[in-house]
Amino acid sequence: MPDPVRVLIVDDSSIVRRVLTDELGRQPGIAVVGAAPDPFVARDKILALRPDVITLDLEMPRLDGLSFLRRLMKFHPLPVIVVSSITPKGCETAMACMEAGAIDVLCKPGESYSIGDLASQLGDIIRGSARAKIRARAQTSDAPPPRRLALADAMIQTTHKVVAIGSSTGGTEALRTILTALPKQCPGIVMTQHMPEGFTGPFASRLNTLCEIEVREARDNDWVTPGVALLAPGNRHMRLARDGARYVVRVCDGPRVRRHKPSVEVLFESVAQFAGPNAMGIILTGMGDDGADGLLTMRRAGAVTVAQDEASCVVFGMPKEAIARGAAMFESPLSDIARHIVDFATGTLRASRSASA
């Protein structure tokens, strides 16, 4: 039986520290090894207790949580889950946490969100992130500008082509890496990233400032057009459909699929149905198996399919499951995936014989 995941709770509220210690301590596979009221105490306890995962509040005395997170990721990187009173109005801070290297950002309980809900979700993330590969990060100002693919003056034929991307834990950074490398002439892109409601809009807006292509949160009946990437809204599923000769997206409510809303499975199944061999499916870093069966359906429908390789994943869960099902034609490092999209657009990357039914 594997050793339990060792967790350090960092929060200035003694009540929150006690409640999280009690709730997480009841869950299988988790051992709360300590708690700290501020980042300076946390620093000492990290060195003494060697936790596998940290939960981190943002509003704390002596040093705010975001500044601590940035220092931690530069000098002593490990999985960090931010647990704070973040609302949709504070999503810019949430995006900053993810860019700084947080595995996930969760809201503290409110009127419609109980401590039980939080503990259950947090426990799942803790168990899944314990084996995450966290790399040291340079400060944002030190990071080089994104290198976009050079295509000379070649025109890319993108008519009726669609790229579908699914991601979860670690996906915000993976999507940034891919989208910032793409030229304006790339095919229309539809994306599902596991994120809460209120986070997807600011995340898409942030990407839009970094990319040559247009990136935005999807609205119901948006057209899928070259040079535009549409991100499924938090707490809504997104499906591909056709409106005459055009591809459009349908944004709708519905039950969770594979425990998620939006679900990668929902997107990929619809892309297989309506785009078939005119599509490319890409499954990126993330916990669980959301999208694995949908990617297989896409491959069987004649699509080009790609899974991010283990070495470049933060969590090799979703790609691993897709590969195990025979859903991926290619297993590729993150750094190669933008080039695959360009090759698909130009027709130099095509589907092999579809996976057997």
Image (tube, grey):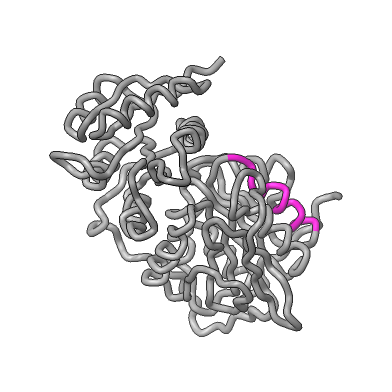
Find the magenta span and give its range: 288-300
Res. 277 visible in picture: no
2 to the left or right of 276: left
Question: Is residue 17 shown above or below 152?
Answer: above
Task: State the count of labels.
Answer: 0
Residue 141, percent across and down? 23, 59
Q: Is residue 55 above or below residue 250?
A: above
Q: Nearer the viewer, residue 75 or 35?
A: 35
Whether residue 98 appears in this view of the structure is yes
Which sits in the foreground, 190 or 131?
190
Question: At 61% across and 50% down in the image, what residue appears?
Answer: 307
* Magenta stretch: includes residue 295: yes
On screen, residue 199 above or below 53: below
The front one of 172 and 133 is: 172
Q: Is residue 78 left or right of residue 238?
A: left
State whether residue 115 is above or below residue 181: above
